[in-house]
Amino acid sequence: MSLYWMLVLGNISFVCGLFAIMLAVAIIVALIVVDDIEYAKSKFIGMSIAFAVLLLGSIFIPSTESLMKIYVVDNVVEYIETNDKARELPDKVIECCDKLMNEYLEEDKDE
Protein backbone atom coordinates (compact mmCIF):
# COMPACT_ATOMS: atom_id res chain seq x y z
CA MET A 1 0.00 0.00 0.00
CA SER A 2 2.86 2.38 0.69
CA LEU A 3 4.00 2.08 -2.94
CA TYR A 4 0.64 3.45 -4.03
CA TRP A 5 1.06 6.53 -1.85
CA MET A 6 4.57 7.04 -3.21
CA LEU A 7 3.16 7.20 -6.71
CA VAL A 8 0.38 9.55 -5.62
CA LEU A 9 2.81 11.93 -3.89
CA GLY A 10 5.03 11.92 -6.97
CA ASN A 11 2.05 12.85 -9.12
CA ILE A 12 1.04 15.62 -6.73
CA SER A 13 4.55 17.07 -6.93
CA PHE A 14 4.41 17.01 -10.74
CA VAL A 15 0.96 18.62 -10.87
CA CYS A 16 2.02 21.36 -8.45
CA GLY A 17 4.99 22.19 -10.65
CA LEU A 18 2.84 22.17 -13.79
CA PHE A 19 0.22 24.47 -12.25
CA ALA A 20 2.94 26.78 -10.92
CA ILE A 21 4.31 27.20 -14.45
CA MET A 22 0.84 27.77 -15.90
CA LEU A 23 0.05 30.31 -13.18
CA ALA A 24 3.32 32.16 -13.78
CA VAL A 25 2.42 32.48 -17.47
CA ALA A 26 -1.09 33.64 -16.53
CA ILE A 27 0.35 36.29 -14.19
CA ILE A 28 2.65 37.63 -16.91
CA VAL A 29 -0.15 37.70 -19.49
CA ALA A 30 -2.53 39.36 -17.03
CA LEU A 31 0.00 42.08 -16.24
CA ILE A 32 0.47 42.79 -19.95
CA VAL A 33 -3.17 42.63 -21.07
CA VAL A 34 -5.19 44.17 -18.20
CA ASP A 35 -5.65 47.94 -18.37
CA ASP A 36 -7.35 48.47 -15.00
CA ILE A 37 -4.47 48.75 -12.51
CA GLU A 38 -6.56 48.30 -9.34
CA TYR A 39 -8.23 45.17 -10.70
CA ALA A 40 -4.88 43.80 -11.79
CA LYS A 41 -3.36 44.48 -8.36
CA SER A 42 -6.10 42.61 -6.52
CA LYS A 43 -5.83 39.61 -8.84
CA PHE A 44 -2.02 39.73 -8.86
CA ILE A 45 -1.82 39.32 -5.07
CA GLY A 46 -4.09 36.27 -5.06
CA MET A 47 -2.34 34.69 -8.03
CA SER A 48 1.06 35.35 -6.46
CA ILE A 49 0.07 33.62 -3.24
CA ALA A 50 -1.28 30.62 -5.19
CA PHE A 51 1.93 30.55 -7.25
CA ALA A 52 4.08 30.57 -4.10
CA VAL A 53 2.09 27.71 -2.53
CA LEU A 54 2.27 25.62 -5.71
CA LEU A 55 5.96 26.30 -6.14
CA LEU A 56 6.70 25.30 -2.55
CA GLY A 57 4.59 22.17 -3.02
CA SER A 58 6.52 21.17 -6.12
CA ILE A 59 9.83 21.78 -4.33
CA PHE A 60 9.15 20.07 -1.01
CA ILE A 61 7.00 17.12 -2.10
CA PRO A 62 9.48 14.46 -3.23
CA SER A 63 9.21 12.85 -6.64
CA THR A 64 8.25 9.21 -7.11
CA GLU A 65 11.84 8.38 -8.03
CA SER A 66 13.19 9.91 -4.80
CA LEU A 67 10.59 8.14 -2.69
CA MET A 68 11.35 4.80 -4.34
CA LYS A 69 15.07 5.23 -3.71
CA ILE A 70 14.43 6.04 -0.05
CA TYR A 71 12.10 3.05 0.31
CA VAL A 72 14.49 0.61 -1.36
CA VAL A 73 17.57 1.80 0.54
CA ASP A 74 15.71 1.62 3.85
CA ASN A 75 14.54 -1.93 3.16
CA VAL A 76 17.98 -3.07 1.99
CA VAL A 77 19.68 -1.66 5.08
CA GLU A 78 17.10 -3.30 7.34
CA TYR A 79 17.54 -6.63 5.53
CA ILE A 80 21.33 -6.50 5.80
CA GLU A 81 21.17 -5.67 9.50
CA THR A 82 18.90 -8.63 10.27
CA ASN A 83 20.35 -11.26 7.90
CA ASP A 84 23.53 -13.05 9.00
CA LYS A 85 24.40 -14.26 5.49
CA ALA A 86 24.23 -10.71 4.14
CA ARG A 87 26.67 -9.55 6.84
CA GLU A 88 29.22 -12.12 5.70
CA LEU A 89 29.31 -10.87 2.11
CA PRO A 90 32.75 -9.72 0.98
CA ASP A 91 33.32 -6.06 0.15
CA LYS A 92 33.81 -6.93 -3.54
CA VAL A 93 30.21 -8.14 -3.78
CA ILE A 94 28.91 -4.91 -2.24
CA GLU A 95 31.08 -2.83 -4.61
CA CYS A 96 29.83 -4.84 -7.60
CA CYS A 97 26.19 -4.34 -6.56
CA ASP A 98 26.83 -0.62 -6.09
CA LYS A 99 28.38 -0.38 -9.57
CA LEU A 100 25.48 -2.25 -11.17
CA MET A 101 22.95 -0.07 -9.37
CA ASN A 102 24.70 3.12 -10.49
CA GLU A 103 24.75 1.88 -14.11
CA TYR A 104 21.05 1.05 -13.87
CA LEU A 105 20.23 4.49 -12.50
CA GLU A 106 22.29 6.18 -15.24
CA GLU A 107 20.37 4.22 -17.89
CA ASP A 108 17.10 5.49 -16.40
CA LYS A 109 18.34 9.08 -16.66
CA ASP A 110 19.29 8.61 -20.32
CA GLU A 111 15.82 7.38 -21.23
Image: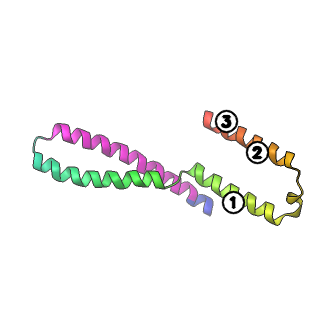
**What's the amino acid at mark 2?**
Asp
Q: Is residue 28 left or right of residue 64?
A: left
Residue bearing mark 1: 74
Q: Residue 31 sits in which quadrant?
A: top left
**What's the amino acid at mark 3?**
Glu
Residue bearing mark 3: 107
Which residue: 81% across, 66% down? Answer: 82
Label 1: which secondary element: helix
Label 3: which secondary element: helix
Q: Is residue 61 magenta?
A: no
**What's the amino acid at mark 1?**
Asp
Mark 3 or mark 2, earlier in chain: 2
Of 87 and 41, the residue lying toward us:
87
Q: Are marks 2 and 1 in contact (CB under 8 Å)?
A: no
Camera-nearest label, 3 or 2: 2
Which residue occupies the extreme bottom position in the image? 82
Q: Is residue 18 magenta?
A: yes
Residue bearing mark 2: 98
Which residue: 80% across, 45% down? Answer: 95
Which residue occupies the extreme top position in the image? 110
Residue range of the region highlighted in magenta in the rendering: 6-34
Mark 2 or mark 1, earlier in chain: 1
Place of residue 73 in the rendered image (x, y in percent of width and height, measured from the top left): 69, 55
* Callout 3 crowding tier (Cα within 10 Å): few <14, some 14–19, many ≥20: few
Q: Is residue 111 visible?
A: no
Q: Quadrant of the N terminus?
A: bottom right
